[in-house]
Amino acid sequence: MVALDAWKHSKDGIQKDLLWMNRVGIGGFMNFDAAMTTPQIVPKRLTYMTDDWKDAFQFTTKLADSLKLEMAIAGSPGWSESGGPWVAPKDGMKKLVWSEIRVKGGKKFTGILPKAPTKTGPFQNIPFSEAMPIGEPVGAPADYYEDISLMAYKLPEPEINLSDLKPIITSSGGIFTIKQLTDGDLATTVLLPVTKNDESAWIQFAFAKAQTFKAITVVGGGDKGLFGLFGEKADTRSLEVSDDGIHFSKDTFIPAGGVLQQTINFSNATSKYFRVTFKNPPPLFSFAAMMGSNEAPIPSPGTDVAEIVLHSATKIDRFEEKAAFAAVTNIDVKGTPNTSDVIAPENIIDLSGKLNADGTLNWTPPAGNWKIVRFGFSLLGITNHPASPEATGLEVDKLDPVAIKAYFENYLDQYQNATGGLMGDKGGLQYIVTDSWEAGAQNWTQNLPAEFLKRRGYSLLPWMPTLTGQII
C-alpha cells in the first residue's frame, strides 16, 4: 500500500498513478485528503467534496476496482483523527473547567458565582492555538459551555490565601503584582524579559516574617516547544529560598510538562524570601526553519508568566497531568503524601440544587473557611489535521458513542455519494485507516457522571475537588 495525497491533480494524473501502481505490483493505496501548505501545481484545485472533487474520486474508485487495487481512506480529512466541519460544538472533545471562591463560615453568603471558563482551549481559560503549524490556517473553534455541579468543601486549617500574607513582589524585569499572579486568569500574561550573560530571570516573593509553603503552581515557561523537541528541561524553572534575600539556595526543580500549568509539591520550606527562576528561553524557530530552511531563528524576548501561587497546604503533585489534561508518559506516580492537609469527605457539600438560573447562590456555610467550586465543561478545540480549510472542523468527542456513531455515519455517507455506491461489499472503497494519534487527551464527556455511577457504584461528584489538586 502507498499513500496517495489530496486530489489536486487531474483525472489524467490519477489514471497514470494507478496504472503505474498496478504495473509495478503495488497492491493498493490510501487516500489522505491532506493539506500541508501544499503548493498548487494544477490550474484548478479540487476542493473536498465539491462536485468536481467527487467526480475525480468516483473516477479513481472505479479505476481502482477494475485494477483490483485495495483502496482506503483516512478516518477524517487530513489523517488525524476523526473530525470535520460537520461536528457540532456540543459533540467536540471536552475538558473539565472550574471557577472558585472562598467564603467564611457561620454567616450567610449571597452572591453570583462566576461560570467556569467557557473559552475553547487546552486548560481553564488558556485560549486555543494550533498545536502544530502545519496545514492551511483555519479560524478558532467556537466556544461551548455547560455546568456540571456546584460543590463546597471546608479548607484544611493550614490553607491560607497567598494574597492575605501580603508579599512584596519584585523581579529581574517586568512589572508583576500579587493580584495578577494569583487571580486564576491563565490567559493574561506579563513578559519576564531575558537577562544578560545568560543569567536566569526571576520573580520574588518577600514576606514580613518567615512563611511555610508546601507546593507551588506556575503558569509560564513550561512549554516544551514544537513536538516537545526541547525536552523535559526546556525553559528550566526552579524555586529558590533565602532567609536574607541575598543568598539563595535551590529548593525545587519545576519541570516542563504536558500542560502549561504545573503544580509541584516540595518538602516544607520555611523562609522569608521565595524566588522562582526562569532560564532564558531558546531562540524562536519557525516551522520552516525546523524543516531545514535557511530562515534565521528569532531571539526570544523572554518568558510570558501568567500565574505563580505558593501553597501553604500540600496538593496533589502534578494533578493537571494526572487528571488527564494531557497525554504524558513521564509521571512518577506517587501515593498520597503523608499530610494532614486533607479535606474530610463529610466536609464536602453538593450545592448544585441551590444554584439559581441566574448564577446566584444563597447559602450559609458551617463554621470554618470554605471554598465553593463551580464545575463545568468546555471545548478543547482540537481539529482534524492537516486538512484543507474546507474540510477542517472539531474532533468528535472520543468518549461519546452517540457522537462518534453520528460522525462516522455522516463521513461514510459522504463517501457513499462520492463513490457512486462503489463501496463496502460492492467493491471499490474498502477500508478506513487510522494513522498517528494527534488528537491529544480529553477528560470529560457529558454522560461521564452517569457512566461512572453505573460502572463504579458511587457518585464521582463529591470527589471532583481532587481534579483541582485537593487531597480528600
Image: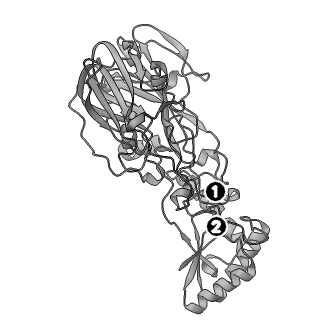
> Residue 219, how many percent across, how many down?
44, 34
Assess disc 2: are there few (<14), some (14-19) or many (≥20) residues with their C-alpha within 10 Å of its C-alpha.
many
Mark seen at residue 33? 2
Residue 221 found in image quarter: top left
Q: Quadrant of residue 160?
A: top left
The quadrant of the image that shows the C terminus is: top left
- Percent position (x, y) of residue 237? 36, 37
**Which of the two discs, 2 and 1, sits closer to the camera?**
2
Is residue 453 among what the camera can see? yes
Q: Residue at x 36, y 48 (%)?
A: 232
Query: At label 1, which amino acid type do we have?
Result: Gly
37 in relation to 195, above or below? below
The picture places residue 196, in percent across and down from the top left corner, at 42, 34
In the image, taking residue 233 as reference, residue 267 lies left or right, namely: left
**Which residue occupies the foreground of this view, 288 or 346?**
288
Percent x, y for residue 455?
38, 47
Quick one: 210 or 85, which is closer to the camera?
Answer: 210
Circle nearer the N terminus (2, 1):
2
Mark 1, residues whose alpha carbon is within 10 Å: few (<14), some, or many (≥20)?
many
Residue at the limit of the structure toward the left, as seen here: 338
Residue projecting furthest to the front:
197
Q: Secondary structure at mark 1?
A: loop
Q: CA distance from mark 2 to mark 1?
A: 12 Å
Residue 459 in sight here: no
* Residue situated in front as seen by the camera: 152 or 42: 42
Q: Which amino acid type is marked by label 2?
A: Asp
Residue 104 is labelled as none
Above or below 145: residue 346 = above
Q: Which residue is mark 1?
A: 84
Above or below, 433 relative to 368:
below
Q: Residue at x 63, y 62 (%)?
A: 409
- 337 relative to 211, above or below: below
